[in-house]
């Protein structure tokens, strides 16, 4: 499938320590940017949440909290 873009389009994904927006933190932000000429740009940034990552969250993430 080919997109007919006039301007760049960005898709982004957040990985978090949970779903509570007042308590939980972002641990990873990544995106893919598609340009009208077909180029793609991707970036990924991991962020230290400065809190324990609950086991329920690590079940779907590729990393865990560091050992105490």
Image (spheres, helix red, strand yellow):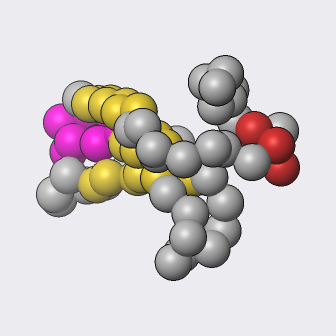
Q: Position of residue 28 (x, y in %)?
A: 46, 41
47 with respect to 16 (left or right):
left
Above or below, comparing residue 31 to residue 64 in the picture:
below
36 with respect to 25 (left or right):
left
Residue plotted at (46% across, 45% down) = 49
36 part of magenta stretch: yes
State whether residue 38 appears in this view: yes
Can you tell which quarter of the image residue 47 is in? top left
40 part of magenta stretch: no
Above or below, comparing residue 62 to residue 37 in the picture:
above
Q: Position of residue 24 (x, y in %)?
A: 56, 63
Q: Residue furthest front?
A: 68
1 with respect to 47 (left or right):
right
Q: Closer to the camera, 64 or 2?
A: 64
Q: Closer to the camera, 29 or 49?
A: 49
State whether residue 14 appears in this view: no
Q: How many marks?
A: 0
Q: Position of residue 23 (x, y in %)?
A: 55, 70
Q: Position of residue 44 (x, y in %)?
A: 37, 31
Residue plotted at (41% across, 52% down) = 11
Residue plotted at (75% across, 48% down) = 54
The magenta stretch spans which residues? Answer: 32-38
Image quarter in which the C terminus is found: top right
8 with respect to 52 (left or right):
left
Q: Residue furthest top?
A: 67
């Amino acid at each position: 499938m080919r997109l007919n873009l006039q301007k760049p389009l960005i898709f982004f994904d957040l990985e978090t320590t949970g779903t509570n927006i007042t308590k939980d933190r972002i641990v990873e932000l990544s995106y893919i940017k598609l340009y009208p000429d077909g180029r793609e740009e991707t970036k990924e940034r991991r962020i230290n949440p400065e809190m324990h990552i609950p086991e329920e969250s690590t079940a779907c993430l590729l990393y865990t909290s560091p050992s105490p």
